[in-house]
Amino acid sequence: MQSRPLARLPLPPPRSGAYAIPVPPSAAYVIRPFAEATDGAFVYSSWLRSGLRHRPACLSRSTYFREQHRVITALMRAALETRLMAVAADDPEQVFGWLFGGAPPAHRLDYVYVKPIYRRLGVARALLSAFGPVQVYTHAGELLLPDAEYNPYLLYNLPPLP
């Protein structure tokens, strides 16, 4: 039996009208400090959900959610954290992404999140630029930082060995 080549289907037309996805120009956002009252719930839920993709396959969802909740809550309560939000310039309630890290001089990057629709527009780069040079990062996701050390154990703040 002879196989036939698959027919090439035309690409669907780009979305327009009521269902169009608004992609802002890179200059349409500003970096501002984190505000617990307005940003806390979004940061917590997006951190928890986005980290789920990077968990090891052998780690159950229930264990992930229980333990990651503890880590995120502790980091959000830390007094010396640097917390930055990338928001729309004309609407500070429209969040594009956020960054959590250790306050200078440590420059420890804990997590950077950008909404999928706003990725590849320089939002994470702008957040990292506002944060300063990263010396160490505690979460290895899709972000590669060749000049920084990856050390997830800093999250646990364990006492030194005797």
Image (spheres, helix red, strand yellow):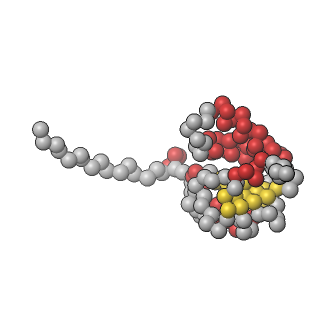
Pick the front one: 114 or 60: 60
Pick the front one: 69 or 137: 137
Looking at the rendered structure, the number of numbered marks drawn on it comes to 0
Coordinates of residue 44 in the picture (x, y in percent):
73, 43
Rendered residue at 27%/49% (across/down): 8
Rendered residue at 46%/50% (across/down): 15
- The quarter of the picture where residue 81 lies is bottom right
In-image side of 152 versus 52 (left or right): right
In-image side of 4 versus 53 (left or right): left
Q: Residue furthest top?
A: 62
Q: Residue furthest front?
A: 162
Q: Residue furthest right?
A: 79
- The quarter of the picture where residue 70 lies is top right
Specify the quadrant that holds the N terminus.
Answer: top left
The answer to whether any part of residue 142 appears in the image is: yes
34 w.r.t. 6: above or below = below
Coordinates of residue 143 in the picture (x, y in percent):
60, 58
- The quarter of the picture where residue 83 lies is bottom right
